[in-house]
Amino acid sequence: MMKIKGRGFVFAGLAVVAVLVGVFAWTSYGQFGRSKYTSPPENVAVTIGGDPINIEYYAPSMHGRKIMGALVPFGVVWCTGANWATKITTQANLEMGGLKLPAGSYSIWTLPNQNEWTLIINKQTGQFHLNYDSSQDFGRTKMNLKTLAAPVETFKIELRSDGGNKGTLALLWEATEASIPFTVVR
Protein backbone atom coordinates (compact mmCIF):
# COMPACT_ATOMS: atom_id res chain seq x y z
CA MET A 1 0.00 0.00 0.00
CA MET A 2 1.37 3.37 -1.03
CA LYS A 3 1.17 6.22 1.41
CA ILE A 4 0.27 9.56 -0.24
CA LYS A 5 2.48 12.34 0.94
CA GLY A 6 1.40 15.94 0.71
CA ARG A 7 -1.76 17.68 -0.24
CA GLY A 8 -0.71 18.01 -3.87
CA PHE A 9 -1.70 14.43 -4.62
CA VAL A 10 -5.13 14.94 -3.02
CA PHE A 11 -5.77 18.10 -5.05
CA ALA A 12 -4.57 16.40 -8.24
CA GLY A 13 -6.91 13.48 -7.56
CA LEU A 14 -9.82 15.83 -7.01
CA ALA A 15 -8.99 17.67 -10.24
CA VAL A 16 -9.03 14.40 -12.19
CA VAL A 17 -12.41 13.49 -10.67
CA ALA A 18 -13.80 16.95 -11.55
CA VAL A 19 -12.62 16.60 -15.16
CA LEU A 20 -14.18 13.14 -15.44
CA VAL A 21 -17.48 14.41 -14.02
CA GLY A 22 -17.39 17.30 -16.53
CA VAL A 23 -16.73 14.95 -19.45
CA PHE A 24 -19.56 12.65 -18.35
CA ALA A 25 -21.95 15.59 -17.97
CA TRP A 26 -21.02 16.95 -21.41
CA THR A 27 -21.54 13.61 -23.17
CA SER A 28 -24.79 13.02 -21.30
CA TYR A 29 -25.97 16.48 -22.35
CA GLY A 30 -25.20 15.60 -25.97
CA GLN A 31 -27.24 12.42 -25.72
CA PHE A 32 -30.05 13.49 -23.41
CA GLY A 33 -29.83 17.28 -23.19
CA ARG A 34 -31.83 19.90 -25.08
CA SER A 35 -34.62 18.35 -27.06
CA LYS A 36 -35.52 19.63 -30.49
CA TYR A 37 -38.93 20.20 -28.90
CA THR A 38 -37.74 22.73 -26.31
CA SER A 39 -40.43 25.22 -25.28
CA PRO A 40 -38.87 28.59 -24.42
CA PRO A 41 -40.33 30.98 -21.84
CA GLU A 42 -42.41 33.87 -23.19
CA ASN A 43 -44.05 36.91 -21.67
CA VAL A 44 -46.83 39.14 -22.95
CA ALA A 45 -48.11 42.30 -21.29
CA VAL A 46 -50.64 45.04 -21.92
CA THR A 47 -51.80 48.12 -20.03
CA ILE A 48 -55.55 48.67 -20.13
CA GLY A 49 -57.20 51.58 -18.38
CA GLY A 50 -53.82 52.37 -16.79
CA ASP A 51 -53.52 48.91 -15.23
CA PRO A 52 -50.85 46.37 -16.29
CA ILE A 53 -51.76 42.78 -17.09
CA ASN A 54 -48.98 40.24 -17.65
CA ILE A 55 -48.90 36.61 -18.77
CA GLU A 56 -45.87 34.31 -18.42
CA TYR A 57 -45.88 31.02 -20.31
CA TYR A 58 -43.78 28.45 -22.17
CA ALA A 59 -44.25 28.32 -25.95
CA PRO A 60 -44.14 24.89 -27.60
CA SER A 61 -43.85 24.57 -31.39
CA MET A 62 -45.53 22.25 -33.88
CA HIS A 63 -42.35 20.70 -35.38
CA GLY A 64 -44.52 18.93 -37.96
CA ARG A 65 -46.74 17.37 -35.32
CA LYS A 66 -50.55 17.37 -35.26
CA ILE A 67 -51.52 19.60 -32.33
CA MET A 68 -55.24 20.01 -31.69
CA GLY A 69 -56.89 16.70 -30.90
CA ALA A 70 -53.50 14.95 -30.74
CA LEU A 71 -50.62 16.57 -28.81
CA VAL A 72 -53.29 18.74 -27.14
CA PRO A 73 -56.07 16.15 -26.73
CA PHE A 74 -59.71 17.17 -26.80
CA GLY A 75 -61.65 16.77 -23.56
CA VAL A 76 -58.57 16.92 -21.31
CA VAL A 77 -57.46 19.93 -19.25
CA TRP A 78 -54.36 21.48 -20.85
CA CYS A 79 -51.82 23.70 -19.08
CA THR A 80 -52.10 26.16 -22.01
CA GLY A 81 -48.44 26.05 -22.94
CA ALA A 82 -45.68 23.74 -21.74
CA ASN A 83 -43.39 22.96 -18.81
CA TRP A 84 -45.07 25.03 -16.06
CA ALA A 85 -48.58 26.40 -15.72
CA THR A 86 -49.26 29.64 -17.55
CA LYS A 87 -49.45 32.55 -15.08
CA ILE A 88 -51.55 35.69 -15.38
CA THR A 89 -50.91 38.64 -13.08
CA THR A 90 -53.23 41.62 -12.99
CA GLN A 91 -53.11 44.73 -10.84
CA ALA A 92 -56.76 45.42 -11.62
CA ASN A 93 -59.97 43.49 -11.15
CA LEU A 94 -61.01 41.78 -14.39
CA GLU A 95 -64.28 40.50 -15.71
CA MET A 96 -63.88 37.58 -18.15
CA GLY A 97 -67.05 35.97 -19.34
CA GLY A 98 -68.96 35.31 -16.13
CA LEU A 99 -65.84 35.46 -13.94
CA LYS A 100 -65.11 38.47 -11.73
CA LEU A 101 -61.40 38.05 -11.14
CA PRO A 102 -59.85 40.10 -8.30
CA ALA A 103 -56.39 41.64 -8.81
CA GLY A 104 -53.65 39.08 -8.20
CA SER A 105 -51.86 36.13 -9.82
CA TYR A 106 -53.51 32.98 -11.13
CA SER A 107 -52.75 30.10 -13.45
CA ILE A 108 -54.55 29.70 -16.76
CA TRP A 109 -55.66 26.26 -17.93
CA THR A 110 -57.99 25.36 -20.78
CA LEU A 111 -60.32 22.53 -21.65
CA PRO A 112 -60.13 22.29 -25.46
CA ASN A 113 -62.72 20.49 -27.56
CA GLN A 114 -63.16 20.44 -31.30
CA ASN A 115 -66.00 23.01 -31.32
CA GLU A 116 -65.72 24.65 -27.88
CA TRP A 117 -63.02 25.70 -25.43
CA THR A 118 -63.33 26.50 -21.74
CA LEU A 119 -60.98 28.90 -19.96
CA ILE A 120 -60.09 27.78 -16.43
CA ILE A 121 -58.69 30.26 -13.91
CA ASN A 122 -56.94 28.46 -11.04
CA LYS A 123 -55.94 30.04 -7.71
CA GLN A 124 -52.56 28.27 -7.63
CA THR A 125 -49.47 29.36 -9.56
CA GLY A 126 -46.15 27.65 -10.24
CA GLN A 127 -47.51 24.15 -10.87
CA PHE A 128 -45.74 21.70 -13.15
CA HIS A 129 -47.79 21.29 -16.33
CA LEU A 130 -49.21 17.92 -15.23
CA ASN A 131 -50.19 19.03 -11.72
CA TYR A 132 -53.62 20.56 -12.31
CA ASP A 133 -55.81 20.62 -9.18
CA SER A 134 -59.45 21.35 -10.00
CA SER A 135 -60.24 21.93 -6.31
CA GLN A 136 -58.21 25.17 -6.67
CA ASP A 137 -60.26 26.50 -9.59
CA PHE A 138 -61.43 30.08 -9.24
CA GLY A 139 -63.86 29.47 -12.09
CA ARG A 140 -64.50 28.49 -15.70
CA THR A 141 -65.94 30.33 -18.68
CA LYS A 142 -66.49 29.63 -22.38
CA MET A 143 -64.09 30.98 -25.00
CA ASN A 144 -64.71 32.08 -28.59
CA LEU A 145 -63.22 29.75 -31.17
CA LYS A 146 -62.20 30.38 -34.76
CA THR A 147 -60.10 28.75 -37.46
CA LEU A 148 -57.07 30.71 -38.60
CA ALA A 149 -56.29 31.22 -42.30
CA ALA A 150 -52.60 30.36 -41.81
CA PRO A 151 -51.11 27.99 -39.24
CA VAL A 152 -49.21 29.33 -36.22
CA GLU A 153 -46.03 27.25 -35.75
CA THR A 154 -45.25 28.32 -32.16
CA PHE A 155 -47.95 28.61 -29.52
CA LYS A 156 -48.67 32.27 -28.83
CA ILE A 157 -50.70 34.17 -26.26
CA GLU A 158 -51.88 37.67 -27.09
CA LEU A 159 -53.27 40.35 -24.82
CA ARG A 160 -55.02 42.89 -27.05
CA SER A 161 -56.24 46.32 -26.04
CA ASP A 162 -59.70 46.92 -27.50
CA GLY A 163 -59.93 50.55 -26.34
CA GLY A 164 -61.06 52.08 -23.08
CA ASN A 165 -61.12 49.47 -20.33
CA LYS A 166 -61.64 46.49 -22.68
CA GLY A 167 -59.26 43.85 -23.96
CA THR A 168 -59.00 40.34 -25.39
CA LEU A 169 -57.02 37.32 -24.26
CA ALA A 170 -56.23 35.11 -27.30
CA LEU A 171 -54.52 31.72 -27.56
CA LEU A 172 -53.16 30.85 -31.02
CA TRP A 173 -51.65 27.60 -32.22
CA GLU A 174 -51.82 25.48 -35.34
CA ALA A 175 -55.03 26.69 -37.09
CA THR A 176 -56.92 27.54 -33.87
CA GLU A 177 -57.60 30.78 -32.05
CA ALA A 178 -59.44 30.59 -28.74
CA SER A 179 -60.20 34.00 -27.27
CA ILE A 180 -62.19 35.75 -24.61
CA PRO A 181 -62.92 39.46 -24.17
CA PHE A 182 -62.33 40.99 -20.76
CA THR A 183 -63.00 44.27 -19.00
CA VAL A 184 -60.89 46.07 -16.40
CA VAL A 185 -63.32 46.81 -13.56
CA ARG A 186 -62.90 49.56 -10.99
Image (spheres, rainbow, N blue to C red):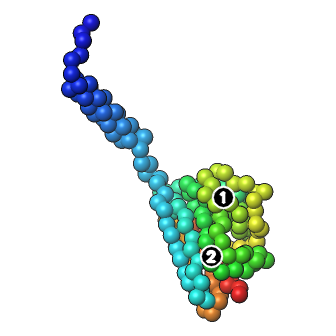
The answer to whether any part of residue 147 appears in the image is no
Which sits in the foreground, 107 or 37? 107
Q: Residues within 10 Å of mark 2 (few under 14, many from 20)?
A: many
Q: Secondary structure at mark 2?
A: strand
Q: Nearer the viewer, residue 174 or 42?
A: 42
Question: Horizontal and vertical percent for residue 182?
Answer: 68, 81
Q: Which residue is mark 2?
A: 90
Does residue 3 appear left or right of residue 118 in this picture?
Answer: left
Residue in view at x 27 percent, y 6 percent: 1
Is 134 placed left or right of 164 in the picture? right
In the image, residue 86 sits, relative to residue 45, either above or below, namely above
Whether residue 92 is visible to the viewer of this picture, yes or no, is yes
- Which residue is located at x 71 percent, y 67 percent? 121
Side of 140 where 14 appears, left or right = left
Give the number of the mark in front: 1 or 2. Answer: 2
Check the image and name the residue furthest to the bottom. 164
User: Between marks 1 and 2, how big is the CA–CA gap?
Assistant: 22 Å
What secondary structure is found at the residue carrying circle 1? Answer: loop
Q: Residue at x 77, y 68 (%)?
A: 139
Pick the quarter of the image with the C terminus.
Answer: bottom right
Q: Which badge, 1 or 2, is on the more N-terminal residue? A: 1
Give the residue number, with chain letter if any, for mark 1. Answer: 78
Point out the residue furthest to the front here. Answer: 6
Tell me the amino acid under the disc marked 2. Thr
Find residue 177 and report its horizontal and vertical position in percent: 61, 73
Q: Residue furthest top?
A: 1
The x and y percentages for residue 28 are 38, 37
Q: Quadrant of residue 184?
A: bottom right
The amino acid on which the numbered mark 1 sits, given as a three-letter code, is Trp
Residue 169: which quarter of the image? Answer: bottom right
Name the quadrant containing residue 157: bottom right
